[in-house]
Amino acid sequence: MGADPEAQFHVLAVDDSLIDRKLIERLLRTSSYQVTTVDSGSKALQVLGLMEGQDISSPASTDKNQIEVNLVITDYCMPGMTGYDLLKKIKGSSNLKDIPVVIMSSENVPSRINRCLEGGAEEFFLKPIQVSDMIRLRLFMLKGRLKEQQQSQQQENNITTGGSSSNSNNINKRKAMDEGLSPEKRRPRFSGNGLALVSYEEI
C-alpha cells in the first residue's frame, strides 16, 4: 500500500512505426509507467478485451487475466484501423469509454485534430513526442483514476441507500398498518373471566 500510485499507471501505446513505438516506450518507462506496445488498432482492441468485429455497445471481456489500461496513446495514421477509428471504438464501449485516449501524429492538420478532440480524445500530440508530454499524460490518468473512484463510491452508496430504503419502507408499512387500525379495533375484548385475550372488536 506504500507504493506510489502513479507508478502503477499502465499505458497502451499503439503505432505501426517500430521506431516511434520504441521512442514512446522509452519515454513512458523513463516516467515510471508500465507500458504495452502494439502495432495496430485491432491488436489494441484485443489487449483491451474488445474484438474488432464486436458490437461497440457490447461489454468488453471480463477475463481475469486481462491487464488494466489507464490510458491509450495511439498514432493517427495507421493501415487498416486509424487512431480515430480506435478512439471511436473505445468511446463507444460501455466498459472502456472512461479510458483516456491521446492521439499523436506527425502531421499538423487542424481539421483532423478537431475531429479527434470532438470524438473524445483528451489531447492531440504532434510528433516527435517530448518528455514534457509525459507530465500531461499523468494528469489525464490521475483524472481518469479519480473518476473511477468516484463511480465506485457512488455504486457503493447506491447499494447502501437501496438497503436502507428497503428497511425504511418495511418499517413505514408496518407503522401505516398499525395507524390504520381504529381505537376500537386496537382495543382487545376479553372473555368472561376477564383474563384471556379473545379478539379485536369489530366495528
Image (cartoon, helix red, strand yellow):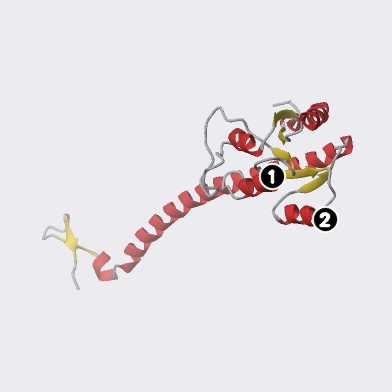
* Residue 58 visible somewhere in the drawing: yes
When the figure is inspected, residue 125 is found, relative to residue 8, above or below; the finding is below
> Residue drawn 41% across and 57% down?
169
Q: Is residue 146 left or right of residue 177?
A: right
> Residue drawn 44% across and 55% down?
168
Q: Quadrant of residue 142?
A: top right
**Residue 60 drawn at (x, y percent):** 54, 40
Q: Which residue is mark 2?
A: 110
- Viewer-nearest residue: 54 or 29: 54
Q: Quadrant of the N terminus?
A: top right
**Residue 20 drawn at (x, y percent):** 80, 32
Distance of mark 2 from mark 1, alpha carbons? 17 Å
> Residue drawn 78% across and 48% down?
123
Q: Quadrant of residue 2?
A: top right
Q: Judge the density around disc 1: few (<14), some (14-19), many (≥20) Cα neighbours within 10 Å.
A: some
**Residue 158 drawn at (x, y percent):** 53, 50
Q: Which residue is mark 1?
A: 82
Q: Earlier in the sequence, mark 2 or mark 1?
A: 1
| Outermost residue to the front | 79
Q: Tell me the amino acid under the disc marked 2.
A: Pro
When the figure is inspected, residue 88 is found, relative to residue 182, above or below; the finding is above
